[in-house]
Amino acid sequence: MNNRILGRIISIAVLAVMTVNAQVCEEKILYNGAGAPGQMESASRTFPEPPEWMANWGEMGSMKPPYIRLSGMKNVKTDWIGALSLSALPRNVQGGSLRLKVRTTQNAKFGVWLSGSRGTGNVVFSDIPANVTRALEIPVEKMLGAGLQRVENVWVGLFGVPVNQYTTLFIDDVSLSCTVAAVQEASVEAGSAASDSGAGFTPTNTVAMSPVRKPLCLSSAAVPASAAYPDADRKRLATSTSASFVLSFNEHRQIRESLEQEANTPAESRRLWYRNLFFVDRNRLRDSVVANPKGVFDEAVAFAAANNYSFMPLLLADVEYAYSECQDTLCSATLLKKTRLLQAGLPSSFVRGSKLKLVYDPYFVVTQKKTLPQVEICVSSKCSSLSVNNFVELEFESAGVQKVSVKLSSGGETQRQNLYVEVK
């Protein structure tokens, strides 16, 4: 990264910190049953039933009706997750905590995490006893890291729900303890508008298969995602497979469906690369296998912001993993099958202006392989090959939502994928 871009990033960070410190943060209620109900994104929901937003099962300790109810039962042991889209979001936060009350009808492993402008954060788990209301308070920094953050969704999940067990999750009194004025984010974007859109870019010469990524634009490396498997389970699985990652069938299904669906909104398109890599990385059987996907994504977001969203890196992943497939209706027998994730992504949901420069730098590739994928990019039937350590300029015919088609080839496999951006 050249010194001008780094200098701009530092200046932007200083401006953001000064602006935030000049403001008094305030608590923002996201849900308490008194306002507008929210939505749960159907593309990422694996809860068996859709949410009931104004449920009333009576008073349950400190939880007063109405509240959110999520219920269901499945014929396999699996994780149930979903993203809550609430009317009070998105919000800018500076530290503080996420607060919420949860209750389950069965003993459960509950997880909560946040997603925002820097991608999806770390999952924080809590063991919830059956029929006990728990008030949780989780530092935002623990989930998303330090500094000014933009929170877009609150994710919730029940993990390892037993087979054929009807379970209900109640959620209430969701809030962020330290939100700050939206004008601060506009200040950050305005500070990066003087960028020269990629002039003088110098490739990083990173070895893509190395798990080590030194910070480029950001001041510190991202915190790794929490591992899904306890140490004992990781060791047991490692003796039964040569794969470095073992996913549930449900996680594998979500990955495949995300690559095959024809249409996404720009915001959904932007999230999919990191979400899929998060599924893979958190199911690792050992640490330091590939570069931290969150770190790579966060650096790509900072790169795009520093270049006024008209010059950005192409995010790439070429990772093999195994997934567990049931061999009977009760899932009493499972078989590990190997497959491959070959995926591209963009760090921004929008492009500033009619032209976009995309760079192929190995720093922004997550892989275990020595050979990097071949890339072809198409916009409005005009296609260009994108080679390593080079960039290609794409031109859009009009403003609004536009499609960027990507063809990836690696090891005899080909993956075609459509990415969507809003041209502003």
Image (spheres, rainbow, N blue to C red):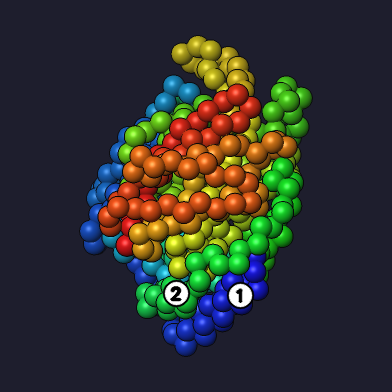
The residue shown at (37%, 78%) is 183
Secondary structure beneath disc 1? helix
Q: Which residue is mark 2?
A: 193
* Image position, residue 206 (x, y; %): 71, 52
Q: Nearer the viewer, residue 368 or 221?
A: 368
- Marks 2 and 1 sit apart, C-alpha to C-alpha, by 13 Å
Q: Residue at x 39, y 42 (%)?
A: 382
Quick one: 368 or 3, which is closer to the camera? 3
**Residue at position x 34%, y 34% in the image:** 262
Q: Which mark is residue 4?
A: 1
Q: Position of residue 118 (x, y in %)?
A: 50, 59
Residue sticking out furthest to the bottom:
22
Residue type for callout 1: Arg
Q: Earlier in the sequence, mark 2 or mark 1?
A: 1
Q: Residues within 10 Å of mark 2 (few under 14, many from 20)?
A: some
Picture quarter with the N terminus? bottom right
| Amino acid type at mark 2 | Ala
